[in-house]
Image (spheres, coloured by chain):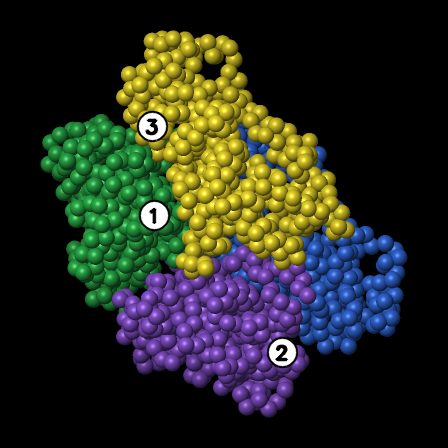
Chain colours: A purple, B green, C yellow, D blue
Amino acid sequence: MINKNKIINDPVFGFITIPNAFLYDLIQHPYFQRLNRIKQLGVAYFVYPGAQHTRFQHSLGAMYLMNETIKQLRFKEQDISDMEATGLLSAILLHDIGHGPFSHVLEHTLTKGISHEDITLMLMQKINAEYHEDLDIAIQIFNNQYSRKFMHQLVSGQLDMDRLDYLRRDSFFTGVTEGSIGSARIIKMLNVKDDKLVVEAKGIYSIENFLIARRFMYWQVYLHKTSVAAEKLLIKILERAQFLCSQGEKLFAVPALSYFIQQNITKDMFMTNDDAIKNFIALDDSDLISAIKIWVNHSDIVLSTLSQAFVNRKLFKVKRQELSEDIKADLIKNYVKHFKISPHDASYFFDIEPLSTSATYHRGSDQILILANNKSVIDITDASDMLDINILDKTVTKNYFCYYPIG
Amino acid sequence: MINKNKIINDPVFGFITIPNAFLYDLIQHPYFQRLNRIKQLGVAYFVYPGAQHTRFQHSLGAMYLMNETIKQLRFKEQDISDMEATGLLSAILLHDIGHGPFSHVLEHTLTKGISHEDITLMLMQKINAEYHEDLDIAIQIFNNQYSRKFMHQLVSGQLDMDRLDYLRRDSFFTGVTEGSIGSARIIKMLNVKDDKLVVEAKGIYSIENFLIARRFMYWQVYLHKTSVAAEKLLIKILERAQFLCSQGEKLFAVPALSYFIQQNITKDMFMTNDDAIKNFIALDDSDLISAIKIWVNHSDIVLSTLSQAFVNRKLFKVKRQELSEDIKADLIKNYVKHFKISPHDASYFFDIEPLSTSATYHRGSDQILILANNKSVIDITDASDMLDINILDKTVTKNYFCYYPIG
Amino acid sequence: MINKNKIINDPVFGFITIPNAFLYDLIQHPYFQRLNRIKQLGVAYFVYPGAQHTRFQHSLGAMYLMNETIKQLRFKEQDISDMEATGLLSAILLHDIGHGPFSHVLEHTLTKGISHEDITLMLMQKINAEYHEDLDIAIQIFNNQYSRKFMHQLVSGQLDMDRLDYLRRDSFFTGVTEGSIGSARIIKMLNVKDDKLVVEAKGIYSIENFLIARRFMYWQVYLHKTSVAAEKLLIKILERAQFLCSQGEKLFAVPALSYFIQQNITKDMFMTNDDAIKNFIALDDSDLISAIKIWVNHSDIVLSTLSQAFVNRKLFKVKRQELSEDIKADLIKNYVKHFKISPHDASYFFDIEPLSTSATYHRGSDQILILANNKSVIDITDASDMLDINILDKTVTKNYFCYYPIG
Amino acid sequence: MINKNKIINDPVFGFITIPNAFLYDLIQHPYFQRLNRIKQLGVAYFVYPGAQHTRFQHSLGAMYLMNETIKQLRFKEQDISDMEATGLLSAILLHDIGHGPFSHVLEHTLTKGISHEDITLMLMQKINAEYHEDLDIAIQIFNNQYSRKFMHQLVSGQLDMDRLDYLRRDSFFTGVTEGSIGSARIIKMLNVKDDKLVVEAKGIYSIENFLIARRFMYWQVYLHKTSVAAEKLLIKILERAQFLCSQGEKLFAVPALSYFIQQNITKDMFMTNDDAIKNFIALDDSDLISAIKIWVNHSDIVLSTLSQAFVNRKLFKVKRQELSEDIKADLIKNYVKHFKISPHDASYFFDIEPLSTSATYHRGSDQILILANNKSVIDITDASDMLDINILDKTVTKNYFCYYPIG
């Protein structure tokens, strides 16, 4: 029986109704509750103070949009069974439970060779075991093993509910209103043809708008140079902590964090040893922040300096140019001299990776298809007179380096 | 002395403060008050019921944005005198006073060979005569005869306050939220270099977004097929009324409307005869609607049928294809037979003009210039890795015809 | 079959879906389309330029909220049949079709002794005749003759969909954001007990908020002193026109307007003579505005002066005091002297009616009932520790007079 | 010189400009940056997932409103010097730096007999020492020792910038839109008379609305029963931790947290011993969350059970009734039996404090004064026909207890 109180206030969509008791239970699950302690945008709050929103809210929002989409597709006489609906809703609700502290920031630092999607899948399987396989369809959809392929597209594709929520939500909380997309309009234009998600012809401008807004959010928010500099700082701190541990140093940390900084945790270890997953789900943003504040007083000058910089927002400075060998040599020389450290230790004070977006739209197996008025189906870049596939499909890379400013 | 009450509630910007007593007087002027009776988007309310907003609100909004821009440029140590500021504010406030009923819809039907900008200028000159030349600078700016050229750009250019207001406002009232642009962010990025309006480098994504949003609004609102069909219907009604008058028929209309339908009013007549302008400023949306409701009962079957269609929203049907000679012949045959009218009379029942946007961005004398970090100035399409000048500069034309549906 | 396109953009609620084909047809009916030409807030746009929204939008919005309410009540296992649902939706959609030009402004000027609700009922009956009695239930609900009494409450009661829409919508378009109510939250708290509409206990604060917001809108918008002064001016113009006609003067007006100013149209005439209703539905805001612009040039100094004042927004001045006999005598003397008119004629230049709200909440047969957690039902003023029935039930009257300012 | 980039995106107010370099430096100060790690609404995110916003954002927002107010008062020719303006802006910016983890939640748990205002003052004095007394005026204003008394009212009074920001901001992030107040309208109505803050007469409805909205937010958000239950749970956890420490148990915690749970930290200790303040500013939300997750595995059944409940959102159940001695005895008996613990230990599993608001408005020395049109000054409750001082001044208390649900 559905509890009438299962309505959640959401500043983005107003009210979110939890569709049924099974989804309510998933929301109450510790794996899901943990998302309440993981910021959606990592350290972007250093640039956009409003960006304190969590993966928890985002996942509820994506579930809300999935529910709207299911209603819309059924209205268009697409047959979706109740079990499939619950599968879709569960899959999108849980799609981010594999995220670690600060979301993407630490994805390849705390762990090696395992993506958050891999971990999501492992956690979904664990929940499924508890729930007598009630997540079977959800897992198949998530995995793209379910027979009806369009369902996977709704969970993970060019126009999935994940993107429809996060673009609007990140735009809302950062205050970067231009990134807002018309999720309601897009959903009203969705349909299914030959088991593929398609967009009705008159939705073409909304899709153009969606692709451009997404690109806008990349450069204005996700790859904002100062925000990236803050991420780099956080990564360098963790790498230094790992290095110190490898040298036998003792570092204050909760056990779950110690687990990940005292050794290299690989995909293999996740697969074969319950400890990895147990420690992983114990971790969230708070453990990192709490520890870094302690590390401010560590005897290692590199760790303490970087930690202090993070806590008090003395972020890395950014240059929009390539880090030439000359500049790099100069930088290292300065750190060596100023901190009286080795060149290796100096390398924690700067980062040289350029900024890079993946393609805004890639015409691969997962296309955005437009359902023309004559019922034929064509790729968005063929249907649009505006979008040039050659531009959209390009990876854009910008020269960039950032470094700790002495003094 | 400024009256403290001179604050106007605006649903788009919150509160608009009237900057000084001179602008207050301009707002009270009958020529400006008339804009309260002219809808910003003509007959778009047939498609977007919220779009009842007027040129009056838009002009106040554009004045508000101009004031914000002046503050911003002064903050960046651009020297703008108080007289120039009042000139800029007056020019943008009055830039639309030359619009006739339903804004653009009837621009080349009620009058011939004279644009609304021409009429705006005539009216500004009339007000200037009343006000002892206090509008001199405003008129020079409007006319692009003022020495500081960037000021004209703020009133009429690629990034003028007109566009910054109407895109946000039309988006707001239609409910097409995706068309919303970040006017506040854009204004914060504006500067002047070598007497040209420039956008600081980090504003480049906002400009991309602005151009795309503008294009979006074109296809989703301004050229919405049903809305265009309603415009065509209104134009056909007026053309029929003019035709009937030319045949000596009597038609109910207020004198000012009769003036424009009983004869061809040309630019020359506006220039040489006070009657044209006097009748023009007496006219607004209400006179058309009131008359058309009477014409529903006119003995001419063409006029009464089209008027009835307009009043009761039985709009022209739209086809997204070219009107071939065959289809056209068929259409005419049907109307001739159904209404027992001549082929000439049948021509009022359909329209064949295709939909067409002008270029989204044209790199002519009035460019959007980006002020790079190294202080050089480059065109937006060179600065952006996204915008392809070849696409933006293209006129897009779509096959389209619309016709009165019998039965 | 439902046409998939039957979705309407609404700036307040996002998208409004037309529930079924019958409602679509009602929306297309000329009686309903006419509401597109009648402003919701009469002449309030003189004070709040954004307030150009129409009864058309409001009625669609109220229908949207009714649909949400029906869903909510069914979710709480209240049995509402499809026929009842359509009845409810139709009744609320059509509840305002009896409004004349400028909504309430002219309600007792153009007509005498007949309310807009009376006319709504007559028009609903006419539509019902066209539609083979498909509006039977709607009319019964509207009339409070339907067996299930709570349904009338949803259409016309303390918490009806009319109020829930207009408070939000008027707040939205005027920009007076404080008047915004939480319609979605209130609807989620609605239920039915013993055939009466009730609000669940935890909704009590939302109801308090609703009552206060409503009162706020009264004083800030509906009874705004300048807006009322504009209404008075409009009424005086029409009364003068009626007076002149009674004296045998000829006045420019469309026939439908002439019909109402050349004679006193009473309820009796509406009931017995088809002409009244025929002329009534031909009228809208445009006819008044169009005529008043002509009257500016009428030879009667009273009519021309007042018409000019209306067209150019030279509104009546307001005093927040009682009009003493002395002040009144002075006023009349001035007008008599300035315009060389009789004292009777002078009386059109001012108005002495004080501002007055009806009770904010009256505990009569139509109460707001709270469903306590123990399932008992109590009046809101008993349930709230904040709302004092003695204050809420009071008619508030403020001294006020307004007059035409000479010079 | 002001850095042009000192503009911060804020989802509530759009853009916040940092007024000058001194304020920029205050924002960069570690004491202020710490607010970025303290949630504005404590654990309200358990009920309103959007409520992750921090004291940092709130303080910036309050500074923004102060800046708007200063502009407005100067426009009304109130003389405010630049030094006073900076004093006002600094005082409001820093007014919350004395808040500890989870804002109010732990105010009397972590510390005894010292309020967050006391700590704010101590921290302001410390910053002042660093800044060569540049905060002198700010401290006097904060302390109500500055000669111009209205300035203190802007920082801490019935209509201070603190409230104007937090009501809007909390409403925004919780999604409880009805709590939104018209801060811009209120500010435009502010003035100063005889060194007292007054509201112009026509702002009276806005003030009524403000008082009601505030009360609404109290019951809907700040005293939401589930949210209060979550606070109680957090407090019980901390009290248990303190108890265990007093018994000589070792508990995992960062040193700063240990400092506060291992001893009673009183106001006296803050005044006389630098350690208290040093440890206080090292603490934030993260340390509590991180520690509680460890305590889940503690051997003490009370601490581990409550910690587990907090981490996994198994919140205290709420009853809206008085906790009678009988029920209490039953509760204790159950916990004693279920957990095999002493009655004293059982007392950590429930809380009996009723919900209580202070008066919505108290007519004491700090009144809300209305400046009547005749320039006299009267209390809001005399000016309003709506607000009953007898009701507003009442402390409202609601029966309430909450307890850990076994099983």
Distance, label 2 to label 3, CA atoms, is 71 Å
Image x and y of residue D370, in percent: 56, 31
- Front-most of A405 and A278? A278
Looking at the image, which is closer to me, A89 or A224? A89
Indicate the amino acid at tag 1. Lys
In the picture, which quadrant includes the C terminus of chain C? top left
Residue annotated with mark 1? B314
Q: In this view, does C395 lie above or below D399?
A: above
Q: Which residue is rendered at x = 62% and y = 75% of the image?
A: A31
Q: Which residue lies at the image location 88% right of the left edge and 55% below the top edge? A: D325
Q: Where is residue C75 in the image (x, y as percent from the top left)?
A: 63, 58
Q: In this view, does C156 lie to the left or right of A182?
A: right
Q: Is residue A51 in view from this perspective? A: yes
Left or right placement of residue B86 versus residue A161 in this view: left
**Is the C-beta separation of discs 1 and 3 under 8 Å?**
no
What separation in Å lies between label 2 and label 1 (alpha carbons)?
A: 53 Å
User: Element at badge 2?
Assistant: loop
Q: Which subunit holds the residue at mark 2?
A: A
The local crowd at label 1, few if under 14, some if 14 to 19, many if 20 or more residues have their Cα within 10 Å, is some
Q: Are marks 2 and 3 in contact (CB under 8 Å)?
A: no
Query: Crowdedness of circle 3 by 10 Å Cα count: few (<14), some, many (20+)?
Result: some
Which chain is disc 3 placed on? C
Identified at 17% across, 46% down, the residue is: B342
The residue at which mark 3 appears reads as C255
**Mark 3 secondary-structure assignment:** helix
Give the residue pinned by disc 2: A134
Circle 2 packing at 10 Å, graded few (<14), some (14-19), many (20+), is: some
